[in-house]
Amino acid sequence: MTRAPVGTLAWCLVGAVLLLPSLFIATDPAAATVLSWRPALWPGEPWRAWSAAWVHLSTLHLVANVIGGVLVIALGVAARVDARAALAWALAWPLTHVGLLLMPELLRYGGLSGVLHGGVAVVAAVLLRQGTAAQRRVGGVIAAVLGSKLLFEAPWQGPLAYPDGWDIPVAPLAHTTGAVAGAALGWLLAQPRMRRTSEVVE
């Protein structure tokens, strides 16, 4: 019986630390008061840069983000990311929320979606940076789809959007800050693929 690679275990650990507290906190209003992102409060309460991901404003919000979290974990496992990728995702987590300072009109934020966009961006960046030719193509497709989604959401139009079918407003900027943080850290921390001698053409 073979052991799971260290990178897979590390990626799953980051995903578990994101998802499991969300299930325990669920949609508790008292927890939201203490843990959600509040730009005016976070300098004196720095844990909010992490804990905001665990806060959900409705059951639909929680269920959708948990499903999304499981899919991002599965994406990283399928891509066979290494421990550097897991570290990039973990570092993108607080940066996702600190990035919301770019839009001070967003007075409150909670949810996993920003950090999950960061995880997808990490996988895309890692595949593009250190993947084989086929993996780079997959990374390019992931990056293109993610970039198109972010542009469609138009985060520059305001702090909140109201998509059909949702019972809460959405903060598109969180998706963008998560994706930018994940892409930058994934690219910087990924080890470039070493070309085999047989691939070198003189």
Image (tube, rainbow, N blue to C red):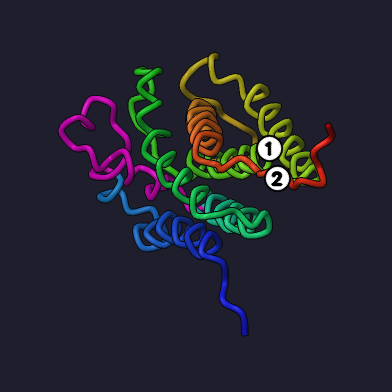
Percent x, y for residue 179? 55, 33
Cβ atoms under marks 1 and 2 closer than 8 Å: yes
Does dot 2 land on a helix, a strand or a loop? Answer: loop
Question: Counting other residues with Cα less than 10 Å from the Cα at mark 1, is it few (<14), some (14-19), or many (20 or more)?
Answer: many
Q: Which residue is mark 2?
A: 131
**Depth order, front residue of 4/20:** 4
Residue designated by label 1: 128
In the rendered structure, which amino acid carries the disc numbered 2?
A: Gly
Which residue: 56% across, 43% down?
A: 191
Above/below status of 75 relative to 175: below
Q: Which circle marks residue 17 in the picture? A: none
Q: Is residue 77 left or right of residue 102?
A: right
Above or below — where is 108 with respect to 85? above
- Judge whether residue 34 is colored magenta: yes
* Visible residue check, residue 168: no
| Residue at 67% in and 28% down | 147
Q: Is residue 20 left or right of residue 82?
A: left
Real-space Cα distance between discs 1 and 2? Answer: 6 Å
